[in-house]
Structures are given as C-alpha cells and as structure tokens.
Amino acid sequence: AQISACVGNHLRFTTFGDNSLCNLFLVLVGPTGTTFKSRITRRVKEMVTEVDSNIIAPQMMTPEFLPMELAKHPSLLWVKDELSHLLTGIKSADYMRGFHGLMLTLFDHIGLYQYGKVKERFRVNDPALTLIGGIQPEVLFEDMFTERNIKSGFTNRFAYVLGDEGLARRAHEPDALQHRDQCRQRLSALASETTITISAEHLVDSAWVWRGSEVAFYGRYGVALAGNAGLHALKIAGLLQVADHWPAGESLKDEWLTVALHLLERWYKGVGDMLVTGIVSEPAERQRREVFAYICLHSHNGSKGTTWAEVASLFHLGKRELDRIHEDLEAGRGWLTADQVTNQPFCNEEALICSRRKEKP
C-alpha cells in the first residue's frame, strides 16, 4: 500500500498496447481486538505522511468530494480504518451510492477522467487512488459479498488479506524499524515526478491462466474473489520491482510475477476458505433465523408483541445488527418458510405496518 500510494500514477505497465496503473484497493480482514487492522493502517499512513502529506486523502469523503481531491492530487492514499462505513453507505445512503461506480472506474483508469457537477467540472489525468481499509469477517460477508457487488465486479476490484496480531507485531520488530529510514528514502524516490512505463506483455498469458485456475478453485466465490487476479498480480509485480530497483527497467521481470502470484494465493486462500466453508455466514445466518422466529412467534393475533429493545437485549444485538434485521423485515426480505422454524403463520404486511407505529417489530 505504501509503494502503491507513493508511486501513484508515475508507474504504468503495458499489455499489448494498453496501459495500466499500479494502484491497489486492499482490505485487511480480521476480528475486532486483534489490533492487526489498526496497526497496519496506522503504519502505512504514518510512513506515507512522512514522504508527502498531500498524498493522504481525508478519512470521510463523499462521491462528489473524492474527484475534487483527485483533481488537486491525482495520486491519493485513502485510509479507511473501518471500511464497513463505506460499504454500508453504498448500500443504504443515497448520497454515498455514487461510490459504487467511482470505485469500479478508478481501480484501473488510465487517461482523462472527468466528473461534472451542476456548475463545475473536474478533470484528472491518470487518477491513481490507493485504498486500504479494515473490516471484520462477518461484515465482509454481509456488506461486501452481496449479489449486486459480485455481479458488478465490485468485489474483485479489492485484494483481501486475512491476518492476525502477529503480522502487525512483526512490522514493529527491531529488524523492521531499523530499516525505516531506508524505506522512507526509497518511497521518496518513488514519489518523484518521473514517469516510468514497463512492458508486461510477455507475462500476460501466465497471469491470466493463473487467474482462471483461481476462479475455478473457489467455485461460488471464485469470480468475486479472483475475477481480477491477473491484473492484481501484474500490479503487485510492478510495485515489487520498483521497490527493489528504481527506475524499474524496460520490462517486468518473471521473478516478481512469481512472487506476486504466491502472495495473492495466500491472500485468496485465507479469505476464500473462510467464505467457502461458511464459517462467516453460518453464525450470522443462524442468529438471524432465531431472531426472525422469535419476532414471528410474538407477532400473532392475541400476542402481547415484543419491542426492539427486548429483541436487542435477548439476542445481545448491537445497533448495526438490529438495523440490518429491521431493514430485512421492512423490505420483506429474508423470511423463512414456516416449516423451517415454526408452524405458526408469519406476520402479514398489515401487522408489520401496525407494529412499526408502536415501535415493535
């Protein structure tokens, strides 16, 4: 992420006449409390700030504000400590939904990018947005791997890293810290105005054949995880090559593509196994079914009903989980068939409307 942010739009690689930038969208996946996500994002932000504070984008942005920032600084690093805020906003908040199309475009956009408002138009040549953010496994499944995001290719724009506290701790070990000045010097060189173009045409076939095998391996989530695996591999290989030697030379070396493929395989395996085996979705889905069954049981005629406060207390739900269940009920989604949980009939639409007026589910 540090290399991607500092090199920005100064590094590009060619594949049969087409140019691509080496910017990345990285998602750090880990449970709350491990400090893995926060330590890594803090370290990335600190180092890049020391090189050039103008590269750092504001934490909170709107779809209108991001193109304005890119117009000032075409190479930007956007650090989102909690990526869930962005994903939830894209799903539910009208003013945030524009991020969906923006992220699809800015992942790999070379040339002129234009964004128009009522009285203004913003123009950016070769925008290079690097994004790094943290997210919990349950939220990743529920907010990122939705049907819309998978079908649109939104999910495979991101590279997912499943980590733990040990990985973050190693970044602060003495061996790592003593090379801090060397890292800063190399990143400062990468942030220069020199534009480097390297050829990757001889490696495209290898990257795309590998991409196909990764997609096939993960089945249902193959496209969602590895749909852009070939492009990710070439981007990471380019970043590793310039980190090793700047200027980077005229062509991308096979050895760096090999390293990039092994690195991505580890990343895909961690998150892919988690998704495919269902260790993320099953607990959340089981809890959701239990809540729905309880609400149905207390929503029949003659029942005294139940309040959202009672549901939250009984099932130990936070505001995020409670809001999600409320949205599912309100939209009529997620209902189970009667024989799955109870033989009692479900609340009908009229009962739902009445219960909402009384602030009861």
Image (cartoon, rainbow, N blue to C red):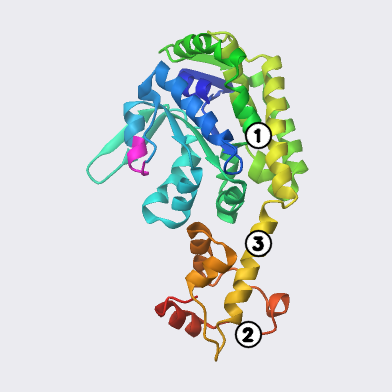
Give the residue at mark 1. 229
Going by the numbered disc 3, the residue's amino acid type is: Glu
Q: Residue at x 49, y 9 (%)?
A: 181
Provide the secondary structure element on which disc 3 rests.
helix
Is 178 left, or right, of 91 in this rendering? right
Going by the numbered disc 1, the residue's amino acid type is: Ala
- What percent of the width, then of the height, locates residue 162? 65, 37
Going by the numbered disc 2, the residue's amino acid type is: Pro
Q: Earlier in the sequence, mark 3 or mark 2?
A: 3
CA–CA distance between discs 2 and 1? 47 Å
22 versus 331 height, above or below: above
Question: Residue farthest to the bottom?
Answer: 302
CA–CA distance between discs 3 and 2? 21 Å
Give the residue at mark 3. 285
Q: Earlier in the sequence, mark 1 or mark 3?
A: 1
The boundaries of the magenta stretch are 61-67
283 versus 14 height, above or below: below
Give the residue at mark 2. 345
Q: Residues within 10 Å of mark 1 (few under 14, many from 20)?
A: many
Q: Residue at x 44, y 42 (%)?
A: 102
Q: Earlier in the sequence, mark 2 or mark 1?
A: 1
Examine the image and state in which quarter residue 252 appears. top right
- What percent of the width, then of the height, locates residue 107? 51, 35
Closer mark to the observer between disc 2 and disc 1: 2
Question: Residue farthest to the front?
Answer: 313
54 versus 295 height, above or below: above
CA–CA distance between discs 1 and 3? 29 Å
Q: Residue at x 33, y 30 (%)?
A: 71
Q: Is label 3 in contact with label 2 (beta carbons under 8 Å)?
A: no
